[in-house]
Image (cartoon, grey):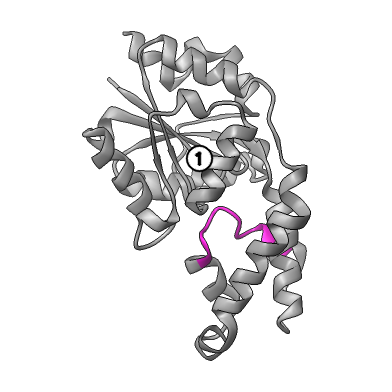
Amino acid sequence: MPKAAIFDIDGTLIDSVDLHALAWHEAMVKFGHDVSFEQARGQIGKGGDKLIPHFLSEDAQRDHGKDLEEWRGRRFKSAYLPLVRPFTAVPDLLKRVRDVGVRIAVGSSAKKDEVAEYLEIARVADLVEVTAASEDAEESKPAPDIFEVVLRKLKLKGADAVTIGDTPYDAEAAGKAGIRTIGVLCGGFTEQSLRQAGCAQVYPGPASLFARFETSLLAEVQG
């Protein structure tokens, strides 16, 4: 039975996907790349190591890839981070998970300092036992590295955990690590895309997962 719940953050616990997409769109345009908001949004959930190569040639990456990513980070923190809000019932859901004896972890493609700030915004920092961020992994999602780091920290196998995420990249990464995934639609991806990527269950968001906890994969920990 699962012993841990591994949560994604952006688009899963906090409403930040559109804001990240705006920052990436603006960064791409500033550095001369015709990348629309919609195109950028479809790649949110990956780290910069996967997102930038999707849009930039190898020559462009060498020339200004690092500068573009750094500009994007500054833009997000100054213009958009103050607008980030948690989704409804996030603390309630994580407390419910904790109360049935499940360990809580976070695996995110965001930077470590961003993860720490997001957990404070979501009011769940005190509920999370283990975190893994982009700096902890060689490759970001959809590579399994971040989830493998979490499992090592928890000293668990993939079959002992359930991931909760909002993107196909979460489900793909978790699947490669042997972890089942619960999808949430609040990040903007379709139910079809989440199920095709491997999500075993899909809910509208944290509030609905909390309300229907007893019939979710997370409830199996009580068995």
Q: Tell me what residue is drawn at x 42 percent, y 50 percent.
A: 172
Q: Tell me what residue is drawn at x 76 percent, y 69 percent.
A: 26
Residue 53 at what x, y percent from top left? Answer: 52, 75
Magenta residue check for 42: yes
- Relative to 177, say whether 138 is above or below: below
- Relative to 136, say whether 202 is above or below: above
| Residue nearest the observer in this picture, 95 or 165 | 95
Which residue position is annotated with label 1?
8
Question: Secondary structure beneath disc 1?
Answer: loop
| Residue nearest the observer in this picture, 79 or 94 | 79
The magenta region covers 38-48
Specify the quadrant of the image occupied by residue 118. top right
* Image quarter of the C terminus: top left
Query: From where the camera sits, is residue 34 visible?
Result: no
Q: Tell me what residue is drawn at x 30 percent, y 22 percent.
A: 3
* Label 1, residues with CA under 10 Å away: few <14, some 14-19, many ≥20: many
Q: Viewed as shown, does residue 19 lie left or right of 151?
A: right
